[in-house]
Amino acid sequence: MLNQIMQSRLRGVMLLGLILIFLPAFFANPFHYELAIQVGIVAATVVGLNLLVGFAGQISLGHAGFFGLGAYFSGIATGTYGWSSIPALVAGAIAVGVVAWIVGRPILRLKGHYLSMATLAVGFIIAIILENERALTGGPDGMSVPPLEVFGWQLSTFGRYSLFGLEISGVQAWYMVAGVLLVIATWFALNIIESPIGRALRSLKGSEVAAGVVGVNTTKYKSLVFVVSAVYASIMGGIYAHFQGFITPDLASFDFSIVLITMVVIGGMGSTFGVILGAVVIELLPQALADFQELEMAMFGLILMVTMIFMPKGLLPTLNSVVPNITRKKAAEVRHDSTG
Amino acid sequence: MTALVEVKGLDKVFGGVHAVEDVNFSVEAGKVYSVIGPNGAGKTTLLNLITGLYTPTKGEIRLGDESTARLTSNQLAERGMCRTFQHMQVCMNMTAIENVMLGLHLRFNSGLLATLFRLPSMRRNEALARERAAQLMDYVGCGDYLASEASAMSYGALKRLELARALAVDPKVILLDEPAAGLNATETAALEELIRKIAEQGVTVILVEHDMKLVMGISDQLLVLNYGRVLAEGTPEQISQNPDVIAAYLGG
């Protein structure tokens, strides 16, 4: 059952939408909303990264760099130059896409550890630039970013809004924005995967030689997926900047790149809904472990290790293979009944 | 008949090893042309050179009117050349039919925007590709695996699947690297039938194979390699009576 739902694009997206709609029933205070918004933004980023890592079998250990670039582009364009948010997000996505393309062309020739090292370096360089261009970025102290503004309508976490006569708070409005973005990000990713482009990407992981001999331009598709995943990161970085209202170069840090990759691996490489689950788990685990205080990071590491040992394919794919065993048996019985 | 594939003075050196040395031959359109020789004779290297996986150290390769020695394998696919591999290259992270649909990449591709929004044009293309892929799977005899994951298929079925994928490119010339390796007698007989069918449709076949019964049965022309050099070329009858070939390869 779970498998069937996950395999059908539309039903998967609808299920995700339903979960997002009913989730606030469990929220007790604005902090829960803020946490959910943050998870949603990061999850959408990871959905994009998964196209590169999970499906195309390439790696990026510098993806936070693109997230940070997107965040600073939005921050500087709206804060310093007074642009409107949407044009800033679009221009940022284009700029980051171009950067990713220029950087990707030479480094995507590399494979395995060498590609890891090269992408790692890209992330570091971006973080260093953000830290040192004080005049533009405010340096290590960071910079403040104005609230998201759409057609003259400002969306601040502290605001109050009315939607169809319903009074909602700023965080609730933001929750809707983040939820809609996550659904769109997921829908786009699923559409890419189940398409000729998606097959070309998956063939890069399955067999690059085979891809080449049937006419797939492997260089082109590696660049394409690198750019697409960087654009995902850039847009979500820009959104994150508006949501937080304050950004620092930490957004582009190596640590955050590793967090993003961990979410992909824990959730389940090559499973779009899996990596969303990965983002939820990795973002919420520190909250759940807060009671352990100084042991928090040790517990965090231990849980990751145990998960990887017992669920090497990731959370959702493992669940998928356990649950259908039960439902399949039932389905077989039903089929037997109807024929007999 | 004109030559479809022509190889002139082809050389490939790996470090100090001359894997292929001064090889010349031409393949006429619509024929089955086989390359045989002992292990390490340079057969697979020759195939890799022709299909753009290796770049020749020296020499010329022509496909039709065009010199193709410097082209990559995907550019060669655009010009109607495809191949299978001795060590199968099937994408195990996809379903069986998706592997064949990958072979239709050049014919049924859609742009990024059409893909992102799943426009009707893209969905139509996908339906056509799926239909064509299913036909091809039936054609090569793995129609039973339409709903399978590639990783769930048997060795013999995977070999046929790889052939279906190569045919999906709609090639003028198809190169098969040891298609019968690891197959039993029944499977080999079925394969022979299949290669014959493919050739009858006008597809030129270049075959690297160790199974002499298969090779002698279906080849129009044979090339014998030994230590990277051409030992002999001729019809199956000529080759089976050639004293050099018997000494080097076929055995007393």
Image (cartoon, rainbow, N blue to C red):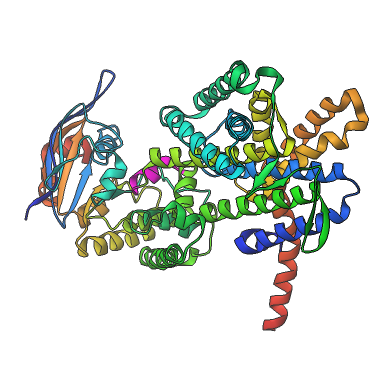
Up/down of B10 relative to A39, above or below: above
Quarter of image, res A327: bottom right
Q: Can residue B175 be seen in this view?
A: no
The one nearer the camera, A196 or B233, is A196
Quarter holding the C terminus of chain A is bottom right
Looking at the rendered structure, the number of numbered marks drawn on it comes to 0
Magenta highlight: main SS = helix
Specify start and end residues of the magenta stretch as a single range.
Answer: A207-215
Instruction: Tell me the residue at 75%/43% (across/down).
Output: A156
Q: Residue furthest left?
A: B1
Quadrant in the picture for residue A133: top right
Q: In this view, does A287 lie to the left or right of A333?
A: right
Residue, far right: A291
**Residue A188 magenta-highlighted:** no
Residue B185 at x, y = what percent?
A: 36, 57
- Residue B141 in which image quadrant: bottom left
Residue A71 in view in this figure: yes
User: Considering depth in this image, is A317 or A281 the residue closer to the camera?
Assistant: A281
Above or below, B115 against A79 in this view is below
Measured from the top left, where is residue A100 in percent x and y?
48, 33
Q: Which residue is drawn at 86% across and 41% down?
A: A31
Quadrant assignment for the N terminus of chain A: bottom right
List x then y, in percent, for residue A218: 39, 41
Relative to B87, is A168 on the left or the right? Answer: right
Task: Identify the residue shown where x is 77% and y is 64%.
Answer: A164
Residue A115, position as x, y percentages in the image: 50, 27
